[in-house]
Amino acid sequence: MSIPFGYASPEQIMRDRAEYARKGIARGRSVVVMQYEDGILFVAPNPSKALHKISEIYDRIGFAAVGRYNEFESLRLAGIRYADINGYTYNRNDVTGRGLANLYAQQLGMIFTDSIKSLEVEIVVAEVGDATEEDQIYRLTFDGSVFDEQGMAVIGGQSDAVAGRLKERYRPGLSLAEALDAALAALTEPGGERSPIGQLEVAVLDRTREQRKFQRLAGPRLERLLAASGPETPEAPPAPAEPTLPEKGAPEVDTGPPTAPDGDIDTGSDS
């Protein structure tokens, strides 16, 4: 049996699609999603004011993505439609992060296997619970694979290096300021400078809020958090003590003859 000219095996096609998607995703900057004491924090370097990498899907559910904006934006809108229809038809509590992650996994898997080009996206779906142990973070790759992450997730860019730096700083029960500091430290290359406040996109799913848990952090509140999370200012060295002057009426103390600069005693007479 002869192999037609230009033939490629299914395995080779899948490898090529995967490599194509990975290269596209790696060109973007990483996004960090991590738990803190009152919920889940999202941090992304993003100089654009119009295009968001972090968004709200439903009352307790947040969405973060890297890759081609038009592709992950279509996924975000599909997730919002799914959540709205199910919440209206049944009950708002029936809309869960797990259900949304399964929906995205089906869509990404079908596109990866059936389309000529796979989507160049990687996404995170996070749901905040009433307690820390009820929080859910799901990471989904371009081929529809789903990973149930514990405590934190990193997507896009140099994700392995960023995740390694984040693991060194992460621990359960971090305050919001501490979690923000850990995320920014992980996103910063060794020896590099952190992204300025105007190029950061930061949001939280805060379990202490009523109704909608999603909130963007910007302006004065973000500035206060960054100031609280920054390195401590070193203490100034103590000022030199001022010479003590004798009190009025106190007897003068004879300290002996003055000493010449070369160490010899000045007798006051010419040599």
Image (cartoon, grey):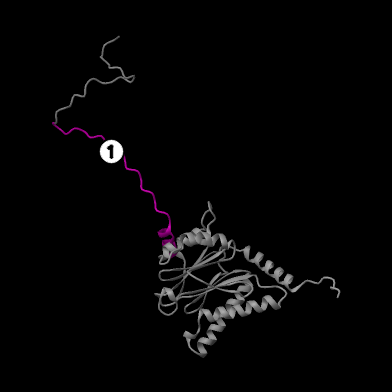
Provide residue 237's location: percent of width, then percent of height: 35, 43
User: Of all residues shown, which one is farthest toward the front?
Assistant: 1
Q: Quadrant of the C terminus?
A: top left
Percent of width and height locating residue 161: 56, 59
Q: Residues within 10 Å of mark 1 (few under 14, many from 20)?
A: few
Find out whether residue 227 is within the magenta segment: yes
x 40%, y 53%: residue: 232
Give the residues drawn in magenta, as a range. Answer: 221-249
Q: Quadrant of the N terminus?
A: bottom right
Give the image quarter of residue 157: bottom right
Residue identified by numbered label 1: 241
Q: Quadrant of residue 241?
A: top left
Q: Position of residue 25 (x, y in %)?
A: 63, 66
The correct choice, above or below, for 34 with respect to 165 in the image is: below
- Please give the name of the residue rendered at 70% of the width and 69% of the height, measured from the top-left corner: 15
171 in relation to 213, above or below: above
The disc labelled 1 sits on which kind of residue?
Ala
92 relative to 122 in the view: left or right:
left
Residue depicted at x 51% and y 79%: 97
Does residue 209 appear left or right of residue 160 in this picture?
Answer: left
> Number of numbered discs present?
1
Q: Kindly give the residue lying farthest to the right in the view shown.
A: 2
Query: In the shown orientation, is residue 253 left or right of residue 124?
Result: left
The location of residue 196, given as percent across then percent down, is 51, 58
Q: Quadrant of residue 207?
A: bottom left
Residue 108 belongs to magenta span: no
- Outermost residue on the top side: it is 271
